[in-house]
Image (cartoon, rainbow, N blue to C red):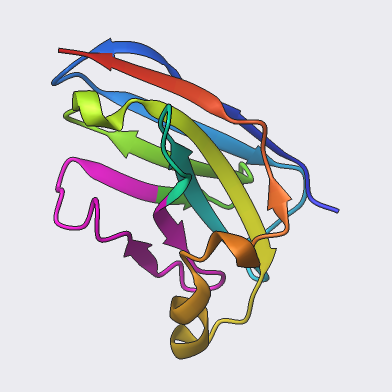
């Protein structure tokens, strides 16, 4: 059983920065895929980004791919997953969820399911991000 606790959400102005953090109850470094998902009011929950076990390969959803102002990272020593925003946009407003699942380190198998929320078995309670223009 893995417990996930998000923090770092809040209100910010467009163009501002924010770092979301997700503390995991166990060491996930080599055996768990970690990801961020988000859900805006009236919309379905969608993937944002994921990071693989082992080498820490990163993959971003098409909706955010190409944005140089957003980055997923992890700190194994702190058992923490991060999502850093450097240039917030109003469309980033959403509830952000951290999720985890067991996974192998093969890129081909991991990448196929990395952004599929149905594959994730552990979820945090979420942290709200509100961006005003």
In the image, residue 76 sits, relative to residue 102, either above or below, namely above
Residue 52: horizontal and vertical position, in percent? 50, 68
Residue 83's spot in the image, x, y percent?
40, 40
Observer able to see residue 8: no
Residue 99 appearing in the image: yes
Q: In which quarter of the image is residue 121?
A: bottom right
100 lies left or right of 44? right
Name which quarter of the figure residue 60 lies in: bottom left
Q: Where is residue 90 in the image (x, y as percent from the top left)?
A: 21, 23
Q: Is residue 110 left or right of residue 100?
A: left
Question: Residue 31 or 76: which is nearer the viewer?
Answer: 31
Q: Is residue 104 above or below residue 4?
A: below
In the rendered image, the quadrant that contains the C terminus is: top left
Looking at the rendering, the stretch of residues picked out in magenta corresponds to 47-72
Which residue is at the far right? Answer: 1
Q: Which residue lies at the image location 35% right of the left edge and 65% below the top edge?
A: 59
In this rendering, the answer to whether 21 lies above or below 63 is above
Q: Residue at x 13, y 21 (%)?
A: 15
User: Is residue 92 highlighted in magenta?
Assistant: no
Q: Residue at point 33% right, 25% down?
A: 93
- Can you give x and y, in whole percent of width and height, for residue 53 in the image? 56, 69
Whether 56 is among the magenta residues is yes
Q: Residue 105's quadrant in the figure?
A: bottom right
């Amino acid at each position: 059983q893995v417990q996930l606790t998000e923090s770092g959400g809040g209100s910010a102005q467009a163009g501002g920065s924010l770092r979301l953090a997700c503390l995991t109850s166990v060491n996930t470094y080599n055996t768990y895929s970690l990801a961020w998902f988000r859900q805006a009011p009236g919309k379905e929950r969608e993937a944002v980004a994921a990071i693989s076990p082992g080498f820490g390969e990163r993959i971003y959803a098409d909706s955010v791919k190409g944005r140089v102002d957003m980055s997923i990272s992890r700190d194994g020593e702190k058992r923490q997953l991060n999502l850093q925003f450097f240039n917030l946009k109003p469309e980033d407003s959403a509830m952000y969820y951290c999720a985890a699942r067991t996974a192998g380190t093969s890129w081909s198998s991991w990448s196929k399911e990395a952004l599929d929320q149905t594959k994730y078995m552990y979820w945090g309670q979420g942290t709200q991000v509100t961006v005003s223009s």
